[in-house]
Image (spheres, rainbow, N blue to C red):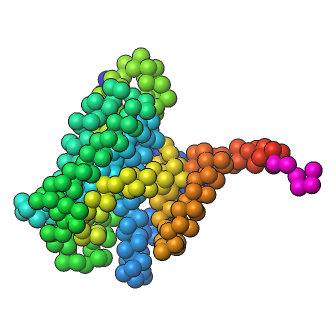
Amino acid sequence: MPLVPTSSVMLSRTKERLWDDLTKPRGILLSLGLLFALIAPLFLQDFQLSIILQIIIFILAVESWNLLAGYYGMFSFTHAALYGVGAYATVIAAAEYGVPPLITPFIGGLIAGLASLPITIVALRLGGAYIAMVTLAYAEIIYLAAITFRDITGGPTGYTGFNALFGGNRVLLYYYVFLIVAVIMIAQYILLVSRFGLVARAIRESEDAAQMLGNNTYRHKLVGFFIGSAFAGVAGGLQAYNILIISPPMLELNQMIQFMAMNVIGGLGTFGGPIVGVVVVFSIAELLRGIIQSRLLVWGLLLIVIILFFPTGIAGVEVKREAFTKRLAQLRRKIPKIGR
């Protein structure tokens, strides 16, 4: 049975699901956010535009991890490292090999996808918590390699030997990034509402049951892992042209934790969750810039609130309103009254 259905079937399913999603309150908010992002350069200053640009890039990175963790149930810790691999591959291809810069983010995505295969082939045969352990070790190897191979990566100081896109014109860069992210997000949405996404969710719920229905679950997970890693690599390549320096901190575990926090807060396993999570977490980070300890405290409190009241994340608030009310009543009964 093919992993991806025919184009006519996929298009029909996508139209039905897209209309259903867009007519919901969350879909309307998402459409308004998309419209705002589209016209933002017309009225925002450079600093504000840079914040929106960073949010758009992070949305792609977190959405790509959501494909693995949210839909397949594969908690990979290699994603930030592959995000960094995509960044390095993007700028090195342009600066050292003369590849046209406009297409190098896609080369970065391809390299990141290929770089994920050695560990994916091994990790997917282990399953469960072992995927997290093995991918965490692989991420550390990639991080150390970025520091060690100074002649290629620039070592701890980073790599800066590449030119800015569009001569440094931030508005053109913004629309270039916006277009690429929009196309990839649409492609991922189509995959998720098609049979490909249904099988992914079936694997998450019960891989044995999915396999009994005639699905090659190992091959399906391998393809999903490659796609998610490639999308992360593209995001890394776009980030390279955004900040104009690539350094090992892009590959660190802290970056991975940030991606995970954004996804969990927004809603794991929902298409709109990463978008909401990135906007909320990044906005808080900007508001609390320079107050590092308070920022971490707010993040921690926010995670606790989300886990207690909204297990599906902020994007699932509308669906979980009754569950929230019930959970709040339970907590009130458990808390002893003062003076009793």
- Secondary structure predominantly adopted by residues drawn in magenta: loop
Q: Is residue 182 left or right of residue 91?
A: right
Please give the name of the residue rendered at 49% of the width and 43% of the height, measured from the top-left corner. Answer: 269
Across the whole image, how many numbered discs are drawn on residues?
Answer: 0
**Looking at this rendering, what residue extends furthest in the right direction?**
340
Q: Which residues are magenta?
A: 335-340
Quadrant where the N terminus sits is: top left
Question: Which quadrant of the structure image shows residue 118?
Answer: top left
Question: Which quadrant of the structure image shows residue 326?
Answer: top right
Q: Is residue 137 left or right of residue 162?
A: right
x, y percentage for residue 59? Answer: 41, 58
Please give the name of the residue rendered at 23% of the width and 62% of the height, measured from the top-left corner. Answer: 156
x, y percentage for residue 164? Answer: 20, 73
Assess whether residue 338 is covered by the magenta stretch.
Answer: yes
| Placement of 112 over or under 90, stated as above or below | above
x, y percentage for residue 184? Answer: 32, 52
